[in-house]
Image (spheres, grey):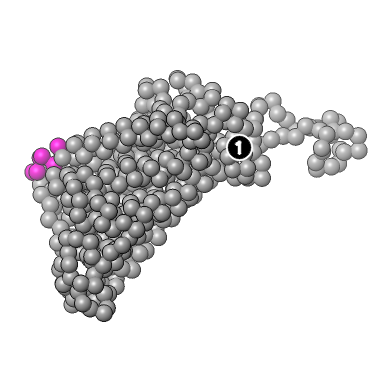
Amino acid sequence: MSASLYVTPYNGTTGDADAGYSTDVTDLNQFYESGDFAWIMTCAALVLLMIPGVGFFYSGLARRKSALSLIMLSILSIAVVDFQWFFWGYSLTFSHTGSSFIGDLSNFGLMKTLAQPSVGSTKIPDLLFCLYQGMFAAITPALAIGAAVDRARILPCIVFIFVWATIVYDPIAYWTWNANGWSFVMGGLDFAGGTPVHISSGAAALAFSVMIGKRTGYAKSAGLPYRPHNVTHIVLGTVFLWVGWFGFNGGSALAANMRAVMACIVTHLAASVGGITWCLLDYRLEKKWSVVGFCSGAIAGLVAITPGSGFVTPWAAVIFGIVGSIGCNFATKLKFLMGVDEALDIFAVHGIGGIIGNLLTGLFAADYIAALDGFTAIPGGWINHNYVQLGYQIADCVAGFSYSFVLTCVILFLMNLIPGLSLRVSAEQEELGVDDDQLGEFAYDYVELQRHTSDVLPTAAELPSGRAGSSKSSEGPEKIV
């Protein structure tokens, strides 16, 4: 552990689970900088803010009768995964001991999780690292569960989130970020979650869409034609995500230092360039400046820069934003080629965007950017003439995508065999809407069941006698908008 003017080098047990009391000191704070504490705690709150942002983004893209359920699922992901993370998730992912694939239960129930320098960085203790990484664990199933839109029951989704976080997320995060993990040992570079968060959630969303089946009325060539019901929600969700991503990528430096600042710079730049790129791609077709297109492109840029944000230069971030946005834009057509009703393009933006980001990291990772934190040393990517790095990145992508897709299919298949955990609502419930059927509440004062272009407001002559001057009529037709 590198010392500074303000901290004492840690002198307790390392390499095994230990609360820190082996140091025989009364003040466990003396081993850490208060500035690092403040930055990472702030970043944890920023990442927490991203999760309802996901809900609002998905809600705006969906139909009105499913809007509230998507927000609810994102909030449920926080609660369910927080318990899972306390129970055994943190231990399985970031225990100090373990195999090359998964950790052990030495920190079960957060026992002995306090002041020992964390697996992620000697700059912060286990307890703070647990708080911060718990937000990553919570947002990942929240990203994937958007595939449930319009057609999934809430209870099976809750069970799925808990099981998926344990069986899928924890192993992938372990092998990517834990020093004992096979990808980490191999030399794979993933600063903030290209594989554990984005590729895994994109693959899971694709698998969920395959297993649960198409929505009623879905056509292979045109999908289910409807417009996003609330673009304001999409913008709101994008703002939450964009702001939160400063904590997502910037906080992954795990200290307040120059590397964290650079991660924030490249994150912001990739998002800006990605939004403009997608907007221009849509303009070439529709000759309209699409707000939804800009928001989608900004998210694509943020996804693409995630694995490389602590490794690449600002000029490379421009490439990440452009290539990530173009790749994700064209990837939205893959669902038609595959015949899969992947309603919210989670696979296209997070799955493909994460793969693009991982591969570009293999090209543009720079040793001098990683070294901005004062202690990280990497061989870099192609710009450092380390050409094997791209092979490591490909291996990580293939492993993460394949593992997440296959295990998600297995989990959902087995859940469907268990009484009470069948995934899909009935056709009648789907027509009514998940909000009404599963929640009994609505995102708005009413739910739109149908809209026809022939719907018109009644004229004065059509209103019953004595009602011409009234603003409401219980007998005349009412326009639903």
The type of residue carrying mark 1 is Asp
Question: For residue 386: magenta?
Answer: yes
Residue 378 point in image, percent of width and height: 12, 52
Task: Looking at this view, name the residue that lies furthest to the bottom.
Answer: 26
For the point 70% across and 29% down, the residue is 455
Residue 438 point in image, percent of width and height: 58, 39
Task: Looking at this view, name the residue that lies furthest to the right.
Answer: 466
For the point 51% across and 40% down, the residue is 154
Task: Looking at this view, name the residue that lies furthest to the left.
Answer: 385
Nearest the eye: 264 or 93:
93
Q: Residue 194: tell me if it is visible.
A: no
Q: Residue 97: tell me if it is visible.
A: yes
Figure quadrant of the N terminus: bottom left
Residue 436 point in image, percent of width and height: 62, 39
Start and end of the magenta stretch?
385-391
Q: Image height check: is 388 above or below 242? A: above
Judging by the rendered image, the residue that carries numbered circle 1 is 437
Figure quadrant of the C terminus: top right
For the point 37% across and 41% down, the residue is 164
Q: Image height check: is 140 above or below 477? A: below
For the point 40% across and 60% down, the residue is 45
Nearest the eye: 91 or 396:
91
Question: For residue 91: magenta?
Answer: no
Q: Residues within 10 Å of mark 1 (few under 14, many from 20)?
A: some
Task: Looking at this view, name the residue that lies furthest to the front.
Answer: 419
Nearest the eye: 320 or 148:
148
Secondary structure at numbered mark 1: helix
- Give the left or right position of residue 148, taking residue 329 as reference: right
